[in-house]
DNA sequence: GAATTTGCCTAAAGCTATTAGGCAGATGCA
DNA sequence: TGCATCTGCCTAATAGCTTTAGGCAAATTC
């Protein structure tokens, strides 16, 4: 029989493309086999199972995202860096909705620790060096930025901001302004007025 | 044969409980049938199909969340209201992870428009009346709050803030402080320095 | 060129989703 | 109370996805 040249890498890549086309949820071993015009069982020599395939796609997405983020941050600081990083996530999600969804896949701790996921946190920390935050505020800020980026992108893509006025681009720009302002004036915990 | 007394409502309720136990993704018509000790086909007289079941669970979750939110906002204003609303989402997600996941289900526009989803936006707007924002800034702020709440909760639950220091409760408190500060000093769009 | 390894195949079993049609218990009506 | 209807759960059957076991031929190795 003609050999198609399947490899885990090609399957992962094709799986990522499939995810962008039909949604990450719909990425199935069967669909992938069809795409290569090959019988389903043949894929099992290259990926352990369906879960393994999804995990590989997730890792691919995390890596691509981290690479883009590193690129975007290079030579930028302050608000410019903030906007650049934020736009990496938003643009990636728009260009590659399936991969972006894959990047949210819950990985087991060992896999997550070895993934490009850690680079994301590192880069956000790097970005924050342009602002005047010391631990533990820096970590708080890392988590805030992660929440806003992820939350906004996922709500926007899910249609949460129904195509109503004002334009979501405007909101995005204003949110980035607001975050910049906030990071430059990170508030102390308020003293309890009842204290 | 003994009649079990299936109804769409009981199936939805049981589906929600199942979701909290095994995850929304694992909510399946088959699993639900097992739970009622009934054959799978029997459920199809009560729910149209798997998608219909999931949608009903999502609507249930959205309603429960909106009810809790309304309760939390009653008699509160300003930062107190902000924290109360924020905690509704976070606590609900912790108590009912499956339902919270269900609430993120992408609904078709008609269903979404008729859902309790709209109440959520209204309540966030109500909350913002305690701050001095006029349109379109109010909408920007609604979207920001939605993003932070959803983003934080989903990252925290997904293990994104690995059980490392500082405590996620601390971060949460500081983020609410920060949002309060931000809303009380909502920044104007910066003038382009190149202008 | 023979031996071994590798890659895709056939076959088969198990689970989920969904539809069609049947039977008995519940309900409505005389 | 008895009959007719209707409703609710059932059996049966089709179809798709997942996964494992074992086979054969093409590619690789020597």
Image (cartoon, coloured by chain):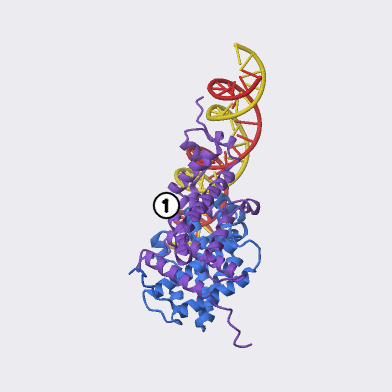
Chain colours: A purple, B blue, C yellow, D red
The one nearer the camera, A177 or D9, is A177
Q: Nearer the viewer, residue B188 or C18?
A: B188
Q: Residues within 10 Å of mark 1 (few under 14, many from 20)?
A: few
Vertical order, B49 against B147 (above or below): above
In the rendered structure, the answer to whether residue A106 lies left or right of residue B77 reads right
Quarter of the image with the C terminus of chain A in it: bottom right
Q: Position of residue B117 (x, y in %)?
A: 45, 68
Tell me the quarter of the picture where residue D5 sits: bottom left
Q: Is residue B143 above or below residue B109?
A: below
Q: Is B85 situated above or below A191?
A: above
Q: Secondary structure at mark 1?
A: helix
Q: Residue at x 58, y 37 (%)?
A: A46
- Compared with A82, B83 (above or below) is below
Q: Is residue A64 left or right of residue B23?
A: left
The residue that label 1 is drawn on is A95
Measured from the top left, where is residue B15 in percent x and y? 56, 59
Query: Which chain does tag 1 point to?
Result: A
Residue B44 showing in the rendered view: no
Q: Where does residue A107 sit, x and y in percent of width and height?
A: 60, 53
At horizontal 62% and vertical 68% (from top left) the residue drawn is B168
Q: Tally the numbered discs.
A: 1
């Amino acid at each position: 029989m003609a050999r198609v040249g399947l490899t885990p890498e090609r399957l992962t890549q094709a799986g990522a493309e499939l995810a962008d086309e039909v949604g990450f949820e719909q990425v199935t071993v069967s669909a992938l086999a069809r795409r290569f015009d090959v019988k389903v069982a043949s894929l099992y020599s290259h990926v352990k199972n369906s879960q393994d395939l999804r995990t590989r796609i997730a890792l691919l997405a995390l890596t691509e995202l981290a690479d883009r983020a590193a690129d975007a941050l290079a030579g930028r600081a302050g608000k410019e860096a903030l906007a650049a990083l934020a736009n990496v996530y938003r643009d990636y999600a728009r260009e590659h909705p399936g991969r972006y969804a894959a990047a949210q896949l819950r990985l087991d701790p060992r896999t997550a620790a070895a993934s490009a996921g850690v680079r994301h946190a590192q880069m956000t920390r790097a970005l924050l060096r342009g602002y005047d935050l010391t631990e533990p505020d820096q970590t708080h800020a890392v988590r805030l930025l992660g929440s806003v980026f992820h939350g906004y992108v996922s709500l926007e893509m899910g249609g949460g901001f129904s195509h109503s006025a004002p334009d979501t681009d405007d909101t995005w720009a204003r949110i980035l302004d607001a975050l910049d302002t906030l990071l430059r004036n990170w508030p102390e915990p308020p003293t309890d007025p009842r204290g």
